[in-house]
Image (cartoon, rainbow, N blue to C red):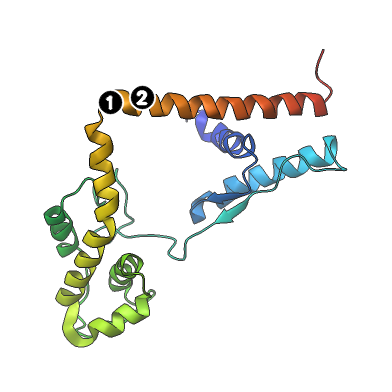
Amino acid sequence: MSGLMFTYPVHQAADILFCHANLVPVGQDQLPHLEISRTIARRFSNRYSADRPYFPEPDALIVPAPTILGNDGAKMSKSAGNALEIRASDDETARFIKRAKTDSERHITYEPDRRPEIANLLTIGAHFARTTPEALADDVGSAGAGRLKQVVTEAVVEGMRPMRARRVEVAERGPRYLRDLLVRGNQRANEVADRTLDDVLGLMQMRY
C-alpha cells in the first residue's frame, strides 16, 4: 500500500490551511479529511495563538446532490468512462443523456430513494434549468422518460454553452497560454504560502 494513502489527508490539510481557507467544496467522502484540517487548525491555535486564533477552522460546502450518476447508473467518474466531458459537442451530449438509465414507470416523479436514475436526471436538468427537481418532474408529468431526457438534454446543452465556448477560446490560445496561467497561479500560491510559513515560524518561536 502506498504511503500516500496515509499522508494524503495531511497534504490536503496543508493545501487548505496555507491560504486560510474558511469554506471548502467537498463531497461526503472528503468530510473526514476536512475534519483533520479543522483539528490541525484548532490545535495549532490552542497551542501557539490562543489569544487570537491564527488558522480558521474551515467549513464544508456540500451540494444538495451528494452523488451524480453516470449514464450507466453508477457514480459518475471520468475513470469509469461514464462521465459527460466539458468538451463534448451538443450531439455527444444528447447521445450521452439518451443512454442514461431510467425505469419502466411512465409518470415522472422525484423520488431519490425509490427512483434514483430518474431523480438523477431531474437533478441534472433542474440545475441547468434553474428550477427544482420537483418542479421539473411536474412539468414532464406523464410524458415519460423519453420526454424527460429531451428536456434534460436541452437544459444541459444551453446551460453548458458559455462554459464550452470559454473552453474553446482558451484552447485556441495554445499550450503556452495555459502554462503561463499555471506559472502565475503557482507564484501567487507560493507567495501566500511563504507568508503563512513565516507567521507559523514566528508563532512557534522557531526562528533561529
Q: Secondary structure at mark 1?
A: helix
- The image shows a total of numbered marks equal to 2
Question: Looking at the image, is 69 positioned above or below residue 190?
Answer: below
Picture coordinates of residue 199, whole percent (x, y): 75, 28
Image quadrant for the C terminus? top right
Q: Nearer the viewer, residue 197 or 118?
A: 197
Mark 2, residues whose alpha carbon is within 10 Å: few (<14), some, or many (≥20)?
Answer: few
Q: Nearer the viewer, residue 181 or 151?
A: 181
Q: CA distance from mark 2 to mark 1?
A: 6 Å
Mark 1, residues whose alpha carbon is within 10 Å: few (<14), some, or many (≥20)?
Answer: few
Q: Nearer the viewer, residue 96 or 88?
A: 88
Q: Quadrant of residue 17?
A: top right
Picture coordinates of residue 44, whole percent (x, y): 77, 37
Residue that badge 1 annotates: 175
Query: Left or right: where does residue 97 sit relative to residue 67?
Result: left
Picture coordinates of residue 138, whole percent (x, y): 30, 85
Q: Are marks 2 and 1 in contact (CB under 8 Å)?
A: yes
Q: Amino acid at mark 1?
A: Pro
Q: Residue at x 21, y 60 (%)?
A: 157
Q: Check residue 179 in the rendering and tell me which mark sits there, or answer none.
A: 2
Query: Left or right: where does residue 99 sit relative to residue 171?
Result: left
Q: Amino acid at mark 2?
A: Arg
Q: Residue furthest right?
A: 51
Q: Nearer the viewer, residue 63 or 154?
A: 154
Question: Looking at the image, is 33 positioned above or below residue 140?
Answer: above
Question: Looking at the image, is 196 positioned above or below residue 118?
Answer: above
Residue 177 can be seen, yes or no: yes
